Amino acid sequence: MSDARAGANDARVLCSCAITGGMSVPGQSPAIPVTPQQIIDSAVDAHAAGAAIVHIHVREPETGRPVADLELFKEVLAGIGERCSAIVQPTTGGGVGMTIEERARVVTDCRPEMATFNCGSFNFGIFRVHHRPEMAPWEIEYLESTREYVFRNTFADLYRLAELFREAGTKPEYEVYDVGHLYNLRHLADQGLVDFPIHIQFVLGVLGANAASLPQLVHVHATAQSLFGADGFTWSAAGVGYPAQFHLAASSLMLGGHIRVGLEDNLRVTGARRADSNAELVTKAMTLAPLLDREPVDADGARELLGLPARLGGSPAAPTPPPAAPTPPPAAPTPPPSAPDHPLAR
């Protein structure tokens, strides 16, 4: 078995840190990085604390509004790459009204080692966030607008995105918010648009998708195994909110998966206190690994685990060659075992 195909018996564990996100507003916490320099500094500090992957969104520097500005992405990706060896993983989530080509420009122009690949459409509600007095009017409007927001990822979008990733030589991290997204991904594999082994990020706890609970994590993991085979993928889990972020981190460690933390998904380090930084969240999560006999890896170890080329120096956002040929998918799926439903509660 190759390192990239290592499964539940592999003691190694990588930590990903989602630095700033696009579905939160600065008024929720002063710790949320906003400017390019703040995002760079926060990513470098998170890497020093143990994050092998730093997941990147960008924001309008003056207001903190989430944007998908290519020049901001270039500045942030280059700035992180100059200061540390982390795998720098930009989002392709884009913004409202953007075409899939516009959303993927960070892939086609920057050709990063990895980037996120969202596997399906769903309601994405953040309107339940408490309105703080320090929030600007646009922030409250932004939160409330998600009562009518659908995160759009049609099959046409998925087909095109798969082509653009392959042309750029960028490894997708497949974002799965709902179990149905796994069947979308299986369909892409059946069309020859997926190169195995793959890396899946389960993001659980968004209002509009699967809950952040152990039964749901077990369900999506078992479904992925039935669709792709135990050796066909590596995986990580992210819980949205507190205490879900750390509960799912512990659950993932027990089940043989990897972990994602960060201010994109959760703003608290304890129930009584908001986190001061991404590094603080990484530090807390990584204390769990040795307690469960898991061995944290650095960025180079993560590259080996994920089947990425070794970093030869320079920016992680530097162009990488495309794969020589597509890898055939595993055998056709068999129906997964049913699992109990679980209410979405945060």
Image: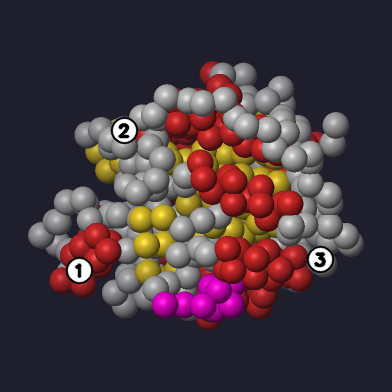
Q: Quadrant of residue 313?
A: bottom right
Q: What residue would you read off at disc 3? A: 322
Q: Amino acid at mark 1?
A: Glu
Q: Where residue 328 is drawn, which disc sits there?
A: none
- Sequence-earlier tag: 2 or 1: 1
In which quadrant is the N terminus drawn?
top right
Q: Are marks 2 and 3 in contact (CB under 8 Å)?
A: no
At x 20%, y 62%, the residue is: 144
Residue at the far front: name it: 335
From the viewer's perspective, is residue 76 above or below residue 345? below
Q: Secondary structure at mark 3?
A: loop
Magenta-span inclusion, residue 261? no
Which one is nearer the viewer's eye here, 106 or 311? 106
Q: Amino acid at mark 2?
A: Pro
Q: Where residue 141 is drawn, which disc sits there?
A: 1
Magenta-span inclusion, residue 101? yes
From the viewer's perspective, is residue 317 above or below residue 279? below
At x 62%, y 26%, the residue is: 256
Q: Which residues are magenta?
A: 97-104
- Sequence-earlier tag: 2 or 3: 3
Closer to the camera: disc 2 or disc 3? 2
Q: Secondary structure at mark 1?
A: helix
Q: Position of residue 194 (x, y in %)?
A: 73, 55
At x 73%, y 33%, the residue is: 229
50 left or right of 244 in image = right
Q: What residue would you read off at disc 2? A: 343
From the viewer's perspective, is residue 173 above or below residue 341? below
Query: Mark 1 packing: few (<14 Cα in 10 Å), some, or many (20+)?
Result: few
In which quadrant is the C terminus drawn?
top left
